[in-house]
Image: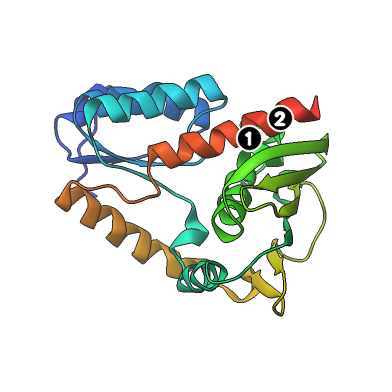
């Protein structure tokens, strides 16, 4: 393809404006700060790192360098998700229930080392916690039970007094991945379901959003700081499950 072949990670940093990461969290946490210190914009995978300390190091490097960063929470870039969140902001929410379930950890391309070690909380948790935090109101407390490598159940307390439930598993046999959020209150329930979403529609929007942010030197709300916020919630949930 005529691509330049580099002998080290540092070499291509002299030839690019931005770096897109698609590596395990521990590798991202090691390399992203190096790229940030070279002034490169970062397209970051979730989670930022394998643990809170590693995520903090990535976020600190981004802040110190003043570079643009963006988090790949794929579903957030779909118009259906945006419409759901817009409607949710107009609702009085008393409670919510949600799930993110699939069987990818049972075998195949996504049954990778870090996912099998840490389970659904670290891999799927950022998606669901992000949606509940925005759709209901900021999360102020978490209780959890179960095993993240099999099934983990979260009870979330929100700033507006609402309570939500989140079920997470990557180790159950289902026909397709199930991602669903149901909001309840004085009005009719509001439901978000990704069953009809074509995730391929997310990528052009994600790429365009990142390119616009880099050119304008202005990050979106889905930046490394948001990733660190979500990692703090994950860390709290993991501690509560022990």
- SS at mark 2? helix
Q: CA distance from mark 2 to mark 1?
A: 6 Å
Q: Residue at x 77, y 66 (%)?
A: 175
Q: Quadrant of residue 40?
A: top left
Name the foreground residue: 55 vs 27.
Answer: 55
| Residue position for label 2 | 238
Res. 234 mark: 1
Q: Is residue 163 visible?
A: yes
Location of residue 74 in the rendering, given as x and y in whole percent from the top left corner? 48, 56
Q: Is residue 148 visible?
A: no
User: How many dots with numbers?
Assistant: 2
User: What colouring style does the render use?
Assistant: rainbow
Q: Quadrant of residue 11?
A: top left
Q: Residue at x 79, y 30 (%)?
A: 241
Q: Quadrant of the C terminus?
A: top right
Classify residue 213 as left or right of residue 56. Answer: left
- SS at mark 1? helix
Say if mark 2 contacts mark 1, CB within 8 Å.
yes
27 w.r.t. 164: above or below: above
Question: Counting other residues with Cα less than 10 Å from the Cα at mark 1, is it few (<14), some (14-19), or many (20 or more)?
Answer: many
């Amino acid at each position: 393809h005529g691509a330049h072949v580099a002998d080290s990670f540092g070499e291509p940093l002299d030839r690019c404006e931005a770096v897109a990461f698609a590596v395990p969290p521990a590798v991202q946490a090691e390399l992203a700060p190096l790229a940030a210190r070279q002034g490169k914009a970062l397209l970051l995978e979730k989670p930022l790192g394998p643990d809170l300390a590693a995520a903090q190091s990535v976020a600190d490097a981004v802040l110190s360098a003043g570079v643009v960063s963006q988090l790949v929470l794929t579903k957030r870039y779909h118009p259906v998700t945006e419409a759901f969140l817009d409607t949710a902001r107009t609702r009085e929410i008393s409670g919510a229930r949600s799930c993110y379930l699939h069987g990818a950890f049972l075998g195949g391309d996504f049954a990778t080392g870090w996912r099998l070690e840490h389970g659904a909380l670290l891999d799927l948790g950022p998606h669901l916690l992000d949606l509940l935090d925005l759709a209901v109101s900021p999360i102020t407390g978490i209780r959890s039970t179960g095993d993240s490598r099999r099934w983990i159940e979260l009870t979330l307390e929100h700033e507006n007094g609402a309570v939500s439930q989140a079920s997470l598993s990557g180790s159950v046999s289902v026909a397709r991945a199930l991602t669903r959020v149901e909001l309840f209150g004085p009005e009719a329930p509001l439901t978000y379901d990704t069953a009809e979403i074509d995730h391929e529609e997310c990528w052009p929007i994600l790429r365009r959003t990142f390119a616009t942010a880099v050119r304008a030197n202005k990050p979106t709300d889905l930046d490394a700081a948001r990733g660190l916020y979500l990692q703090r919630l994950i860390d709290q949930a993991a501690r509560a499950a022990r």
